Amino acid sequence: MDHITKTSMQVTDDNYMNTFTRYPIVFDYGQGSILYDTEGKAYIDFLAGIAVNTLGYSHSRFTNTLISQSRKLIHSSNLFYTAAQAKLAKLLVENSAADRIFFANSGAEANEGAIKLARMYFYKQGMHRYEIITTTNSFHGRTFATLTATGQNKYHTPLEPLPPGFLNVPFNDIEAMESAVGEKTCAIMIELIQGEGGIVEAQLDYVRKLYKLCKKHNILLIFDEVQTGIGRTGKMFAYEHYGIEPHIFTLAKGLGGGVPIGAILAKEDIAAAFEPGDHGSTFGGNALACSAGACVMKILLENDSKLIKECASKGDYFKDKLEKLQNIYPHIIVAVKGKGLMLGTQLDENIDGGNIVNICLDKGFIINCAGNNTLRFVPPLIITKAEIDKLIATLKDILKSL
C-alpha cells in the first residue's frame, strides 16, 4: 500500500464519522467505465457511484460543460433566475409527464418535498388528509420523513419515535394496499424497481391497479424514480414501461451525472399547491448542478435517444448472459431481475453475496450486494458489451469455484 493510499485512509478514519464500511481503496481518477486507484489498479465499474455516473468518467462533453459553467457562475440563489436552471427545467418538463418542477440536492430531499407537496395539496383544499402509504423493502431516503416512509424496520428502530402519518404494506400486493387506504390517505408512494430492496420490479398489473385505486379515492400517486429515472431502465423514466403517468415523481442520482441534484416533478394542479414560502432550498437548482443535468439530458435525448436505446439493448444482452449463468448454476442463482442497466441476481440464502463482491473487487470489478442477497449491477450507461463479457466471465469463474 503506497503512502498516498495509506495516508488518505488514515486521515479519513481519524476525522470522518464512522457511518460507512469502506473498502481499503482510494480512487484517483476515472475514464469511461473504468476507475483507477492511487496505486494504478483498474476497476471496471458496474456500480456507477450507485446508479449516479450516467456518462461514466471524464466524459469530455460533460466535463467541459462543468468547467465552462464553473468559470461563469456556480451559485446565486433562488431569489434570482439563471439560464441553466431554466434550460434544465424546460428539458425535463417537455420530455416527461410533468408540468412543473422543483430542484433539490438529493433523492432524499426530492422525496421529502414530494411528501410535503402531497400533504399541502389536500391542506390547500381544506382537507385533513396526510397519510402516505409505502411498501415493504422500499428505500426513500435518510431524512426523518423519508426514512419513516422507507419500508425497512432496521432503519426505524434506533430512531423512534418517528413522524406519524406513514403506513407500510407488502409490495406488489394490491389487496393490502386497498385495505390500507382510508379517509386520511393522501398518497401512495412506490419505487417501480426497488433498488436497495434487491432489484424487485413492480408488476404491470399491480401498478395499473394502483393507478385506478388512486383515481377512485382521489389519492395522489407518487413514483420514486431516484434510481430508475434518467434512462436507467431503457426508458427515460421507468413509468413509461407501465403506460401510466404519476401525479408526482422524483429524480436524483443519474440526473446530475455525478453532480448532486434532485428534482420533484408534478402535474400542474398538484404543483399549484406550493406557493412562495411553502418550500425552498438554498442550493437546490444552482447553476452548476443544472448545467450538469442539462448536459446529461441533452446527451440522452440526442440522435433519437440513441444512448437510452443502447441502454435497453445492452441491458437485454446483459440479462441474457446472467440468465445463462443461472441455467448453469441454478443452485446458486435463484433469480435474475430488473430492466435495462438496473439488474440483479438473487443468490441462494446459503451463498455469501458480500464475499462475491469482495472477490470481484479483487479481480478488478465493482459491484455490490443489495437486499435479499442480490448482486446489483447499475453500471454507467456507456458500459460496453465487451466490458459486460469480462464481468460475466469473472462471475462464471467465481460461481464455478463455489
Image (cartoon, helix red, strand yellow):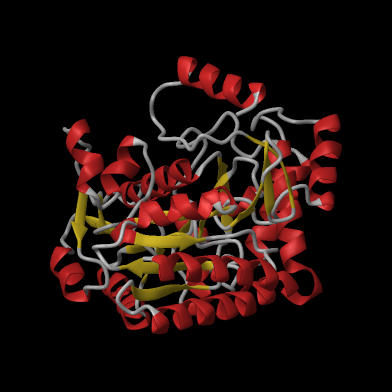
**Which residue reaches farthest left?**
179
In the image, taking residue 168 as reference, residue 35 lies left or right, namely: right
Q: Where is residue 363, by image quadrant?
A: bottom right
Q: Give 326 or 212, whichever is nearer the viewer.
A: 326
Which percent across, then down, holds residue 107? 48, 46
Q: Is residue 284 above or below residue 230?
A: above
In the image, taking residue 353 as reference, residue 29 lies left or right, namely: right
Q: Give 192 or 318, whichever is nearer the viewer.
A: 318
In the image, taking residue 308 as reference, residue 175 lies left or right, namely: left
Q: Where is residue 70, by image quadrant?
A: top right
Residue 196 in view of the camera: no
Which percent across, then down, holds residue 86? 72, 48
Residue occupying the point 44% across, 63% down: 247
Residue occupying the point 41% across, 48% down: 117
Q: Where is residue 90, by image quadrant?
A: bottom right
Query: How many marks can you see?
Result: 0
Residue occupying the point 45% across, 49% down: 358
The N terminus lies in which quarter of the figure?
A: top right
Q: Give 60 or 287, whichever is nearer the viewer.
A: 60
Which percent across, then down, holds residue 19? 39, 29
Which percent across, then down, holds residue 386? 69, 71
**Which residue reaches farthest front?**
401
Q: Is residue 169 above or below residue 66?
A: below
Residue 279 in view of the camera: yes
The C terminus lies in which quarter of the figure?
A: bottom left
Residue occupying the point 16% across, 75% down: 175
